[in-house]
Image (spheres, rainbow, N blue to C red):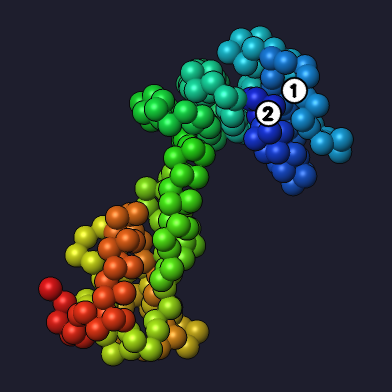
């Protein structure tokens, strides 16, 4: 497959190298020739110097038959414009943009673009690690607005039902694994020590879940009496 990476900073260089290592054809665009020095010496792709908003530069990079384009410069405006051109004028199927400044994230979303906001996602992940004990994150959707969390049922939770443990909003059960077998459980299902429960939740929902687990473990909520 053929991919174009716009921006050869640390993120762009790392991305281009990773995609190239998987055997794909990669072309990197950057307006500064010095930026290509960020690429590892074993990078096997091509690079094109010039403004990525220039259609001539994009054509030299082979956008007419590209399977995907990632716009990862430090300029949110350039990323949005290049991504829009790639999708609307050249019909590139897979287009992803990097959101550098979280204040401009809405601009990418207004274009209907697939956005990776490293600042927003990174800040949320750090926030979670600061006080995350009872649950662990196993998957992040979008830019972390909704994530999959897993928690193991401790002896203190055994005998509780899922309805005892689960918050009333922003958190739903995706699956429960017991003795190597996964099911989609009913809310009334009683938990056993060692069960692995997978939930889909917002950040607020995951915090409410952790508070509920702590409350039950400390005897603050009677089992079978969730209100």
Compared to 195, does 13 lie above or below?
above
In percent of the image, x 58 and y 13: which residue is there?
A: 53
Q: Which residue is mark 2?
A: 9
First in residue order: circle 1 vs circle 2: 2
Tell me if mark 2 has few (under 14), some (14-19) or many (20+) residues whose alpha carbon lies within 10 angstroms of its own: some
At x 50%, y 84%, the residue is 180
Specify whether residue 39 is in view. Answer: yes
Q: Quadrant of residue 14?
A: top right
Assign the C terminus to one quadrant of the image: bottom left
Residue visible at 72% across and 43% down?
18
Q: Residues within 10 Å of mark 1 (few under 14, many from 20)?
A: some
The reply, left or right, for residue 171 in relation to residue 85 is left
Q: Position of residue 184 (x, y in %)?
A: 34, 75
Q: Residue placed at 54% from the left, 21% from the top?
A: 75
Could you say whether the residue bearing mark 2 is in a helix, strand or loop?
loop
Residue 61 visible? The answer is: no
Q: Are the two marked residues, 1 and 2, in contact with CB atoms closer than 8 angstroms?
A: yes
Tell me, for residue 35, which label it has, or none. 1
For residue 90, above or below residue 226: above
């Amino acid at each position: 497959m053929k991919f174009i990476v716009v921006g050869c900073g640390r993120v762009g260089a790392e991305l281009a190298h990773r995609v190239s290592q998987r055997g794909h054809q990669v072309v990197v665009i950057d307006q500064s020739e010095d930026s290509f020095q960020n690429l590892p010496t074993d990078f096997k792709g091509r690079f094109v110097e010039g403004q990525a908003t220039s259609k001539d530069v994009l054509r030299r990079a082979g956008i007419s038959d590209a399977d995907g384009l990632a716009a990862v410069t430090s300029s949110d405006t350039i990323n949005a414009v290049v991504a829009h051109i790639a999708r609307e004028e050249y019909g590139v199927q897979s287009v992803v943009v990097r959101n550098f400044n979280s204040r401009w994230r809405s601009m990418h979303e207004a274009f209907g673009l697939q956005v990776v906001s490293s600042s927003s996602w990174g800040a949320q992940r750090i926030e979670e690690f600061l006080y995350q004990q009872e649950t662990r994150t196993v998957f992040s959707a979008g830019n972390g607005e909704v994530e999959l969390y897993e928690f193991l049922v401790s002896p203190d939770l055994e005998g509780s039902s899922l309805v005892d443990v689960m918050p009333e909003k922003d958190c739903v059960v995706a699956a429960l694994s017991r003795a190597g077998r996964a099911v989609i459980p009913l809310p009334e299902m009683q938990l056993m020590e060692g069960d692995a429960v997978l939930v889909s939740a917002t950040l607020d929902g995951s915090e409410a879940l952790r508070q509920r687990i702590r409350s039950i473990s400390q005897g603050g909520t009677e089992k079978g009496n969730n209100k």
